[in-house]
Image (cartoon, rainbow, N blue to C red):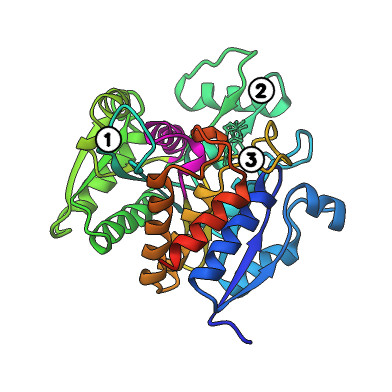
Amino acid sequence: MAGRHRVTLIPGDGIGPEVSAGARLVLDAASPGIEWIERQAGSVALAEHGDLLPEETLDAIREARVAIKGPITTPVGSGFRSINVALRQGLDLFAAVRPARSLPGVPTRHGDVDLVVIRENTEDLYQGVEFAARSPQAEALREELRRLADFEIRPDAGVTLKPISIAGTRRVVRFAFEYSKANRRGTITLGHKAGIMPTSDGLFLRTAREDSIDRGDVEFEDMQIDHLTARLVREPGRFDVLLLPNLYGDIISDLCAGLVGGLGLIPGANIGWEYAVFEPVHGSAPDIAGKGVANPIAMILSGAMMLRHLGEPGGASAVEHAVDAVLEAGKVRTPDIGGSSSTMDVAEAIASALAR
Ligand code: ATP
């Protein structure tokens, strides 16, 4: 049967194939029309194709326009800094969306968390402009900086550049406002360190401020990132949408995962104008890989985000409610949240809760 949606599935490394199998089971039950196109990236792709990120995988995502992937580990010395970053940059997936909400039956310090991190995904310190200490390039950079503005960098310094552009900021700001309106979110809080980095963080802040005028019902505020971090751990219920440059977004999303019960529970999406790739926030967790005990909920909730993106809000809500129901019942859960069930036990319990 031809599917209503074509979706590229990249199982990934470590616990990736396990949580992917769990997510597929649930998504097939929630939306039987998905046609899966399975492609590889990471160590399996290297073994099969001699390439960590094969062009045929990228082509499959471009063709389907939507993909869901498990975590991918980048082997040290492989020539890639990060396969995940290469994928985001290659497909221009400029906004990462990571919702963190308190889940029933998962005890945490704060019970009222319902926030969404929107992270700029292509620029900032992740752009990959690196100058190794004592390299000829670093030496040339030192000379150029001295000539340009009398900046003196120590001869043994390694340098990572932090480019943040107006165009790169505008699109993620626009996305954040559109997302907030579409999802009935009231306030965007932008995190920055503009006092210390006026030309990069300051530009991010000024551009967002200008573009936030006339944005209708969504409130806009900004906060220094250090202050924001302290407020987040004390009163996370005060926040709604957090809009952050790349590096702060990476760190704060893990902090938010911790606030609601851990990495095994937090879904994510990487969105561009043309393509969308859904993935859990967690990595490949080699310590538990192959044991069948990884929590599939982050991947399953990433699948719910994907269903919403595909125009199936009913299916998405059904998956989210089924996850809540299984967590609330508390009988079937993986060890990371205090249970002893397997990955597939949890996926099966969620799939059968869908039907109820
Ligand atoms: P990366 O650098 O790719 O983010 P990492 O090793 O820093 O990877 P993760 O792989 O995300 O971080 O995981 C950190 C730890 O959290 C793991 O070692 C594992 O114990 C736990 N963890 C992460 N994801 C899950 C999951 N889905 N289920 C259970 N435990 C998990």
Between 245 and 141, which is closer to the camera in this rendering? 245
Q: Are marks 1 and 3 in contact (CB under 8 Å)?
A: no
Query: Quick one: label 3 or label 2, which is nearer the N terminus?
Result: 2
Residue linked to disc 1: 111
Asked if disc 3 is less than 8 Å from ligand 1, the answer is yes
Q: Nearer the viewer, mark 3 or mark 2?
A: 3
Q: Is residue 248 magenta?
A: yes
Q: Does dot 2 land on a helix, a strand or a loop?
A: helix
Horizontal side of 35 relative to 333 (left or right) equals: right
Between 260 and 53, which is closer to the camera in this rendering? 260
Residue linked to disc 3: 293
Magenta residues span: 246-267
Residue 32 shows up from this direction = yes
Label 1 to label 3, Cα distance in Å?
A: 26 Å
Vertical arrangement, residue 194 with respect to residue 122, above or below: above
Q: Position of residue 277 (x, y in %)?
A: 54, 59
Q: Does dot 1 land on a helix, a strand or a loop?
A: loop
Q: Position of residue 270 (x, y in %)?
A: 49, 55
| Residue ID at (28%, 25%) | 195
Query: Quick one: label 1 or label 3, which is nearer the N terminus?
Result: 1
| Residue ID at (47%, 64%) | 306
Q: Please, what is the three-letter code of the amino acid marked with disc 1? A: Gly
| Residue ID at (39%, 37%) | 106
Horizontal side of 257 relative to 52 (left or right) equals: left
For disc 1, the neighbor class at 10 Å (few under 14, some 14 to 19, many from 20) is: some
Q: Please, what is the three-letter code of the amino acid marked with disc 2? A: Glu
Task: Kindly indicate the quadrant of the structure image that contains residue 311.
Answer: bottom left
Asked if disc 1 is less than 8 Å from ligand 1, the answer is no
Residue linked to disc 2: 139
